[in-house]
Amino acid sequence: MNMLSPNQAIADLIGEQFIDWINQYVPQEMQSWAILEEMSTTQSKSEKIKKFVLQVFLANEAFLGSREGDPGFLRFAIANLSESDDPLAETALTILENRRTEELVGHSVEQGILKTKSREQWVILLLTLGFSPEEIERAEPKEPTRNFIAELSEIYSTGEWQTAVGAFAAYDISENVIRKAMQQMLVKLGLNHKDLEILNTENNSSMILEKVTFDLESKELVWQGVMRQLEIRKEFLTDLEKYLV
């Protein structure tokens, strides 16, 4: 079917219809990004691809916060929604809190670094690519990664709560698209399915939008979050493109 424009979708769709539209719109929009095609088709040397993957890993670490005292995107969003008096925020807040609990199952803290199943899978991938454990521990985000983390953190912590959940839902959708493109990139380096386990995982937080996609104002705020997340994500990946060309 023909994809509705954002203005049409905001005006005409409600509830599950609007959520389904976002789930379709985000991947379709991302397929127009030049960096996505570059990731899928790059002939860059493995050393450059390794640098690209390392920065994506560090950006992913910001979701939970990789070190003690680092709130991470998830806790920023939880704190934002916790401050809202809007009863509709309660459902979304519960979903975020449950997500954090699930993400931290079986975690530990070693030398101030948060160890989770997700991190373990990323580390397997990085080790397979030839990084040493010491290189992984010492890795620092470059400027594009720092900007990505700072800009998304601001949305989650200071934006309207509806905008925060819109950005959160779009984060998961776009993350799934990025991981598929990275799979295509890394298979060329001889990595197998087990090596790429972290890139086979998918998250879906669309249900966080269930109570907030019925009135016009809320849909507009959600859409602001979706678009800002996409803009920030595109800028981040495009700034990393130097590793792939």
Image: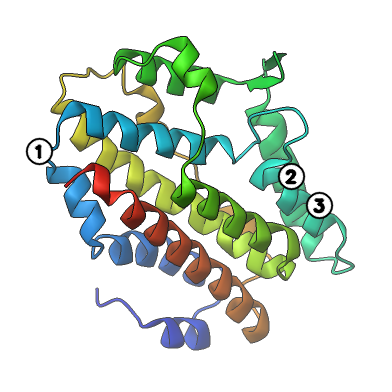
Circle 2 is placed at which residue position?
75
Q: Quadrant of residue 74?
A: top right
Q: Which residue is at the front of the view, 142 or 70?
A: 142
CA gap, disc 2 to disc 1?
38 Å
Q: Is residue 122 above or below residue 210?
A: above
The reply, left or right, for residue 53 in relation to residue 15 is left
Residue 114 location (% of width, % of height): 66, 22
Residue 138 numbered tag: none
Q: Residues within 10 Å of mark 3 (few under 14, many from 20)?
A: some
* Label pair 3/2, CB-CB below 8 angstroms: yes
Q: Is residue 160 above or below residue 207?
A: below
Q: What's the residue at 73%, 71% (across, down)?
A: 160
CA gap, disc 3 to disc 2?
6 Å
Q: What's the residue at 9%, 38% (across, down)?
A: 43
Circle 3 is placed at which residue position?
79
Across the whole image, how many numbered discs are drawn on residues? Answer: 3
Q: Is residue 99 above or below residue 35?
A: above
Q: Residues within 10 Å of mark 2 (few under 14, many from 20)?
A: many
- The amino acid marked with disc number 2 is Arg
Circle 1 is placed at which residue position?
43
Q: Name the secondary structure under disc 3.
A: helix
Q: Quadrant of residue 87?
A: bottom right
Q: Name the secondary structure under disc 1.
A: loop
- The amino acid marked with disc number 3 is Ala
Visible residue check, residue 210: no
Pick whichever of labels 1 and 3 is earlier in the sequence. Answer: 1
Q: What's the residue at 40%, 61% (across, down)?
A: 235
Q: Which residue is at the front of the view, 60 or 6?
A: 60
Residue 203 location (% of width, % of height): 49, 41
